[in-house]
Amino acid sequence: AQSVTQPDIHITVSEGASLELRCNYSYGATPYLFWYVQSPGQGLQLLLKYFSGDTLVQGIKGFEAEFKRSQSSFNLRKPSVHWSDAAEYFCAVGGFGTGRRALTFGSGTRLQVQP
Amino acid sequence: DAEITQSPRHKITETGRQVTLACHQTWNHNNMFWYRQDLGHGLRLIHYSYGVQDTNKGEVSDGYSVSRSNTEDLPLTLESAASSQTSVYFCASSDRGLGEAFFGQGTRLTVV
């Protein structure tokens, strides 16, 4: 069965500092990986996705993520955090094939940004 | 613009009542999903559909049902609401194959 682990429940960074959110996955085939962001009271917005090819993917709002197959990881990074980045971030995994098109989500990491 | 809408946004119901949450998408997506979001659990899959007349159980399907009579709608029914079903419910859709999932704004359901 597929699963996603986000080890950090809550992270606090200072505005302007760099950010890395961790994500580890378990999947029996080539995974399709996603990062979503959720602002309070809102739905989820896609930040970026990895399907194949270049293991470093760029997303919206200055975010990037690196797929490392050997480590089963897909960590999200941003070089300089803005106060508006405070939100909850979810990593998700999915794939082709019957039963694999539904995404499995991690439990989320809540990001707090200090001025 | 295409979108996915959920209604109602907030609902309070009593234990034992039947409740239906609506989800409507104008993306013309084949895949539709229902998730519930609870603190510490992230989003957990309740039911999903890959097309008209197709429905499948997800990780936490007990007490819930769905039906897919057209491409645009996937209503979620709680047969007999329980306090454990107090949660925020999200509907999502994606294109055939695997594209990213697009989410509605969520429905906050409270069962008292």
Image (tube, rainbow, N blue to C red):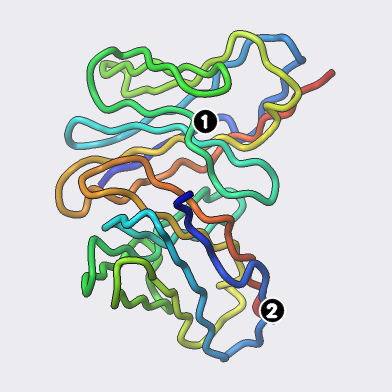
Which mark, by number, is residue A7?
Answer: 1
Where in the figure is residue A111, as x and y percent of width and height? 67, 30
Residue B31 against residue B47 in the figure, above or below: above
Residue at 55% from the left image edge and 83% from the top image edge: B81
Of all chains, the one bearing label 2 is B
Q: Secondary structure at mark 2?
A: strand
Q: Amino acid at mark 2?
A: Ile
Residue at 41% from the left image edge and 59% from the top image edge: B26
Badge nearest the viewer, 2 or 1? 2
Q: Is residue B50 left or right of residue B77?
A: left
For disc 2, the marked residue is B12
For this rendering, which residue is in front, A38 or B1?
B1
| Residues tagged by mark 2 and mark 1 found on one chain of the structure | no
Q: Secondary structure at mark 1?
A: loop
Residue at 32% from the left image edge and 57% from the top image edge: B28
Q: How many marks?
A: 2
Q: Quadrant of residue B100?
A: top left
Is the C terminus of chain B in the top left, top right, bottom left or bottom right quadrant?
bottom right
Where in the figure is residue A84, as x and y percent of width and height? 72, 27
Q: Is residue B51 left or right of residue A14?
A: left
Of all chains, the one bearing label 1 is A
Q: Amino acid at mark 1?
A: Pro
Q: Residues within 10 Å of mark 2 (few under 14, many from 20)?
A: few
